[in-house]
Amino acid sequence: MAASLVFVVAVSVADWLVGPNVSLVIFYVLPVIAATWLGRIRTGVILAVLVTVVGGSIAAADPGTATDVVWLWNAAIPFAFYLLVVWLVAGQRTLLEIESRRATTDPLTGALTRRAFYEQADIDLDRARREHRPVAFIYLDVDGLKVVNDTIGHAAGDELLVRFAVVTRSAKRSSDQFGRLGGDEFALLLVGADLTEATAVAERVLDRLRHAPGLESSASVGVVACPKTPGQLDGLVRLADQLMYLAKRSGGSVVRAIEYDPQPAIDLRPAGDRARPAADRHQPAAGRHQPGGDSSTAST
């Protein structure tokens, strides 16, 4: 809005200098477009009224040969043009937002789509890596969805998925990413959470599923927590997927959790040095030359 106001002032000065015989309507419409795109319809209408008043005031101060009727017409037509631009720009912005939501949000559950989840996960991992924060990944599989679809119907299965998504969203932290990876498979990415915190989130999901109204449901959950941010998410996903299947083979409604260090500290010292006691590491090894010692012994 501030930039638009500055631009309107600059255009109005130019409008006054060029006189009534040259129209600068095309320049007045630029801040209206910007205000509508960034601030929505209300802001665009406010800018449209403002530039109409400014342009009309300049025309009234220096009408040239125009009569009162012509002056009024010249003021009304630009205002109608500005409002048309506001309507078109706002409509285009709405269509863009709808398409963006369709591309990034699962239409049934409201969770992120698989592609959007992994794209956001890459962003979160980069930030966690810069801040040296732990990361946890939770893989969730809805128990019994196929049975519900086959016995009650797909409408009931959809209701079960929607209920699961609502419960999971209420149990997770506000900063956690929640996505649908497949038909009955979902995932959570927790930045800054250790194994205890991630397991607590998973257990909270199961507890709320047990007590939520509607179709009885549960989930099999695999949790992997990393004290150091991994370079990629693939390893965490595979490990959490395996843990989830272990939970499912155990009968479901179970959390299997593990802590995994993707960047373990590696001791690069020679094997002989690693085997020596810590107290001896600063002592010279036998057979090495020592200041003031027997050189023949050292050479031997």
Image (cartoon, rainbow, N blue to C red):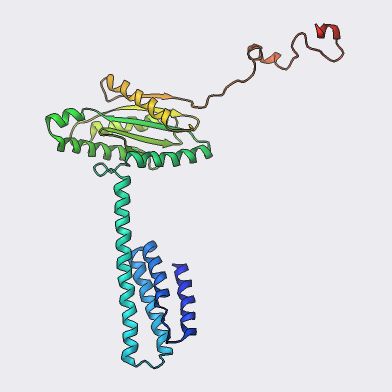
User: Residue 165's spot in the image, x, y percent?
Assistant: 27, 38
* Quarter of image, res 39: bottom left
- Placement of 298 over or under 100, stated as above or below: above
Query: Seen in the image, is 100 located left or right of residue 290?
Result: left
How many callouts does the rendering have?
0
Residue depicted at x 70% and y 13% = 280
Q: Give the position of the C terminus as an image quadrant.
A: top right
* Quarter of image, res 44: bottom left
Residue depicted at x 30% and y 66% = 88
Query: Seen in the image, is 62 located left or right of residue 105?
Result: right
Query: Seen in the image, is 22 located left or right of residue 217?
Result: right
Q: Nearer the viewer, residue 273 or 136?
A: 273
- Placement of 238 over or under 27, stated as above or below: above
User: Residue 233's spot in the image, x, y percent?
Assistant: 43, 32
- Placement of 295 over or under 198, stated as above or below: above
Q: Nearer the viewer, residue 88 or 257?
A: 88
Q: Nearer the viewer, residue 126 or 209?
A: 126
Q: Going by the picture, which residue comes out furthest to the left?
A: 152
User: Residue 103's spot in the image, x, y percent?
Assistant: 31, 46
* Quarter of image, res 28: bottom left
Q: Give the position of the N terminus as an image quadrant.
A: bottom left
Q: Going by the picture, which residue comes out furthest to the front?
A: 22
Asked whether residue 294 is in view, the answer is no
Residue depicted at x 39% and y 36% = 189
Asked whether residue 240 is in view, the answer is yes
